[in-house]
Amino acid sequence: MTDFAAIILAAGKGTRMKSDLHKVLHPIAGRAMLHHLMASIDTLGPKRKVVVVGAGRDQLEAALGDDAETRVQEPQLGTGHAVQQAEEPLGDFTGDVLVLYGDVPFVRGETMRAMLDRLHAEDAPKVVVLGFEPEDALAYGRVIADDEGRISKMVEFKDASEEERACTLCNSGLMAARAQDMFDLLRRVGNDNAQGEYYLPDIVNIAIADGDTCAAVTASDPGEVAGINSRAELARAEAQWQELKREEAMANGATLRAPETVFFSYDTQIGRDVTIDPNVVFGPGVRVADGAHIKAFSHLEGATVGEGAQVGPYARLRPGAVLAKDAFVGNFVEMKKSTLGQGAKASHLTYLGDAEIGAGANIGAGTITCNYDGYFKYKTTIGERAFIGSNSALVAPVTIGADAIVAAGSTVTRDVAPGELRMERAEQSIKPGWADRFHDTMKKKKRGETK
């Protein structure tokens, strides 16, 4: 495929969102809509990416980092004027240009490739337009084209005749052209219209008037080119994405007992023979291995669930939670930055934070790892086959040896040797002023670290 550059238009204010967050940064399945689009573009290996920004420039530049160049459109004088802002950063680039929209996030890489391939077909069109055929064409602009996709006219709905309105091929606004052709045509676009703006689709009619060929490629699914301009449209886009992801998970061998109640993230990985009960939510960064069972009302984020492991119901796995093969966490168990070894169990009412738990260990109800003193985090290590009795507090840093037993109700502040029984049920002691001295010391230490 010929080298190409992607120009992404994202200068709109998005006023219908009624949000301080830039429109294209609103998330779908845990990922900003702009990043959904960028990920699709990246599958084709673009040479350059230029994002045209306006209001909310700082937010977009922070979100993009080094992933794309940005250019400001100010004032905002239409889509044609927006594309012109990318001419200078592209410099002497001589490849193809693909014009996309930051609020149209679901365009597939295959569709972009089809547009670029059509640009280099035998009839060598000057411009390729992405069309779509919705169930109801409503007031979309029409693309009048023959059976080979060669365009004879682009017309706005309000200017179309009854015959033209009967055409079902609509204009998505996405286009491809060779860089020199794109910018040469744009220089000829006028703004003699009610808004006084320069419209990108005008380049098609200019090229046709010159006697050049322009062509249309039709999106296989109208949902690919759905624009998002309001909270309601954002919700519909989320629903659309989730429905596709659920179908994909089931097609790949997972059982979803109530698919409409399961919510995936953009990067969720689900193995074969996984069972997912109703009302489960996957945040970003979750991998679930073959044969695992995620029970109802569980929430997972940044977690890895091993083969045959069980989670929930009503469990929460936070970032860094790892369940090895056949491990089990039950109802009202929370894990964060902790590993539960093969066959280990934490059946209910437990918090495991910054912990490493060996294979076959049993964590009793009400156990907590006390990993935070208000200033720093500390680690708890529990050996293989250790048994932690109910309502125990393990004050990190602490190590519980293999095969050790911690009696129920214990507060463990010192290491427990392998095979040892530890019972800590001392009478309450009072140390006046100790907490004040502790806070003073730790604040001094904290200040020293942050200098």
Image (cartoon, rainbow, N blue to C red):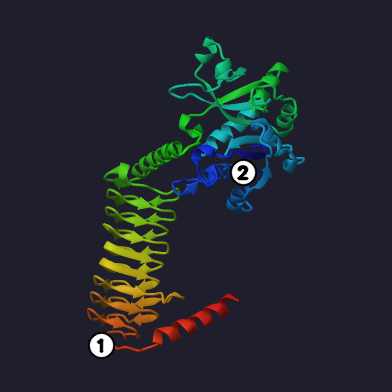
Q: Which residue is mark 1?
A: 426
Q: Position of residue 2 (x, y in %)?
A: 67, 37
Position of the C terminus, as image quadrant, is: bottom right
- Tell me, for residue 55, which label it has, or none: 2
Question: Is residue 108 visible to us here?
Answer: no
| 146 lies left or right of 350 | right
Q: Identify which residue is drawn at 66% across, 23% down.
A: 202
Q: Position of residue 349 (x, y in %)?
A: 26, 66
Q: Residues within 10 Å of mark 2 (few under 14, many from 20)?
A: some
Tell me which amino acid carries mark 2: Ala
Helix, strand or loop at mark 2:
loop
In the depicted structure, whether residue 402 falls above or below residue 19 = below
Position of the N terminus, as image quadrant, is: top right
In the depicted structure, whether residue 151 falls above or below residue 361 = above
Tell me which amino acid carries mark 1: Ala
Helix, strand or loop at mark 1:
loop
In the depicted structure, whether residue 431 falls above or below residue 381 = below
- Which of the marked residues, 1 or 2, is nearer the chain's N terminus? 2
Q: Identify which residue is drawn at 40% across, 60% down.
A: 303
Q: Identify which residue is drawn at 27% across, 62% down.
A: 332
| 305 lies left or right of 33 | left
Q: Identify which residue is drawn at 52% across, 10% down.
A: 162
The image quarter containing residue 338 is bottom left
Question: Is residue 64 visible to us here?
Answer: yes
Q: CA distance from mark 1 to mark 2?
A: 63 Å
- Residue nearest the viewer, comparing 144 with 138: 138
- Do the CB atoms of the residues marked 1 and 2 lie less than 8 Å apart? no
